Image (spheres, helix red, strand yellow):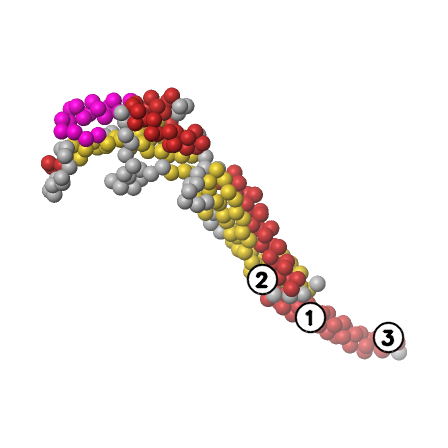
Amino acid sequence: MMKETLQKTLPAVCIAVGLVVLGWFLYTGINHIAYRDRQVLVRGLAEREVMADKVTWPLVVKTLGNDLTRLYEQVNANNAVVVDFLKANGIGDAEISVGAPSVYDKDAQTYKTELPYRYNVTSVITVTSSQVEKVNGLVKRQVELMKRGVVLSQDYSYQADNQITYEYTGLNGIKPDMIAEATRNAREAAAKFAEDAGSRVGGIKSAVQGQFSIADRDAFTPWVKKIRVVTTVTYYLEDR
């Protein structure tokens, strides 16, 4: 009798248990889907100011005259004066390069100018150095070259590249810390959003590291660089 009753009730019990398990899985699955649909996208910023660690300083010397042979002699003499000035103030041979002079011949031009001299010879001596502060000091003292008969040209219009420039080459050394800082800031923003929404921050769904940018802090101190990076992170939101 009991065996027959058990045989009759066992399928019903199994069906009931199966329905309960199926319902639990359905409930969990629905909650899981709802949880996955709840997310927040935030951005984290990291900024730093650093000193440039490389400077390129072109010293442009123009020499005018009508006798090309004498002009070349004068150009070589002027170049020697500039190089001596640089070396005497701590700039090494490896940091100095002397470019070939370029010659402007007024008589060879289609459109004549009113220049009093036929030839305009331009020579560029370039300093490329990691001694940024030292070079900045020499830039301020370049007027001393006038006492030795050399006048540096302040007209860089003939070649846009002939401007003093500053670079920061140590980016790889600070990248990890800046990325970590940007990610922390992103999570703080997500946490604040979640708190206001009555939730809490879950795991990361996706993350994108933005491009690093290096720019002058301002127009007056180009040797001070501002570095910034923005990371974009999507977090899941969970119930508290």
Percent across and percent down for residue 111 are 12, 43
SS state under label 3: helix
Quick check: is 239 in the magenta stretch? no
| Relative height, residue 49 to residue 70 (above, below) | below
Q: Nearer the viewer, mark 3 or mark 1?
A: 1
Residue underneath mark 3: 3
Q: CA distance from mark 1 to mark 2?
A: 24 Å
Residue type beneath disc 1: Tyr
Residue 121 shown left or right of residue 174 in the figure: left
SS state under label 2: strand
Residue type beneath disc 3: Lys
Tag shown at residue 40: 2
Residue type beneath disc 2: Val
Q: Residues within 10 Å of mark 1 (few under 14, many from 20)?
A: few
Asked which quadrant contains residue 34, the reply is bottom right
Asked which quadrant contains residue 126, the reply is top left
Q: Nearer the viewer, residue 88 or 147?
A: 147
Which badge, 3 or 2, comes first in the chain's sequence? 3
Residue 96 shown left or right of residue 14 in the figure: left
Tag shown at residue 220: none
Residue 213 shown left or right of residue 238 in the figure: left
User: Residue 113, can we see it?
Assistant: yes
Q: CA distance from mark 3 to mark 2?
A: 59 Å
| Relative height, residue 87 to residue 53 (above, below) | above
Q: Residues within 10 Å of mark 2 (few under 14, many from 20)?
A: some
Q: Residues within 10 Å of mark 3 (few under 14, many from 20)?
A: few
Which badge, 3 or 1, comes first in the chain's sequence? 3
Tag shown at residue 27: 1
**Residue at x-position 76% and y-position 72%:** 17
Percent across and percent down for residue 159 are 27, 40
Magenta-drawn segment: 63-80
